[in-house]
Image: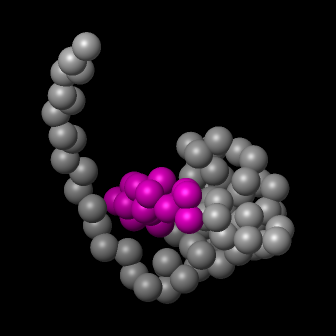
Amino acid sequence: MLRSKQPAVAVEVYPVNASTLRLLWTVVDETQTSTLVQVADAELVQQLLWQLKNKIWLTSEETNTISAYLSSRVPLIRDLALARLA
């Protein structure tokens, strides 16, 4: 069975400064391991984004960019969380 190819969706990516990224990874580090490992991918991204937004103000463009960044880093975040348990 052949699948129809979905058209690529262009997403405009805005730069995020280094201090925001450092703070984001601090948020990841401060988040409970059980949360990082057990929640669904989309929920994890939303929780981390919510925690970051409680620390700093983000534009809608930054929010979208960081959300995409987090989504692409979920496997790494989970691997780091599992390493805490070892």
Q: Main secondary structure of the magenta part?
A: helix
Q: Is 18 colored magenta in this rendering?
A: no
In the image, is residue 85 above or below residue 2? below
Q: Does residue 22 appear to the left or right of 85 in the view shown? A: left
Residue 38 to residue 52: above or below: above
* Residue depicted at 65% across the width and 78% down the height: 26
- Foreground of the two, 60 or 17: 17
Q: Please identify the quadrant where the C terminus is shown.
A: bottom right
Apparent side of residue 60 relative to residue 4 in the rendered image (left or right): right
Q: Is any atom of residue 71 visible in this view?
A: yes
Residue 84 in picture, x, y percent from top left: 78, 72
Q: Is residue 61 magenta?
A: yes
Q: Residue at x 24, y 51 (%)?
A: 11
Magenta extent: 58-76
Which residue extends farthest top?
1
| Residue farthest front in this picture | 1
Residue 63 visible at all? no
> What residue is drawn where x is 56% and y is 65%?
76
- Image colouring: one colour
**Side of 45 where 4 appears, left or right:** left
Residue 74 occupies quadrant: bottom right
Location of residue 23 in the rendering, given as x and y in whole percent from the top left corner: 58, 79
Task: Specify the quadrant of the image occupied by residue 25.
Answer: bottom right
Residue 39 x/y as whole percent: 71, 45
Residue at image position (21%, 41%) is 9
| Above or below, 83 relative to 11 | below
Q: Is residue 56 left or right of residue 86?
A: left
Q: Quadrant of the N terminus?
A: top left
Q: Residue 75: x percent and y percent? A: 55, 58
Q: Quadrant of residue 60?
A: bottom left
Total numbered badges shown on the rendered structure: 0
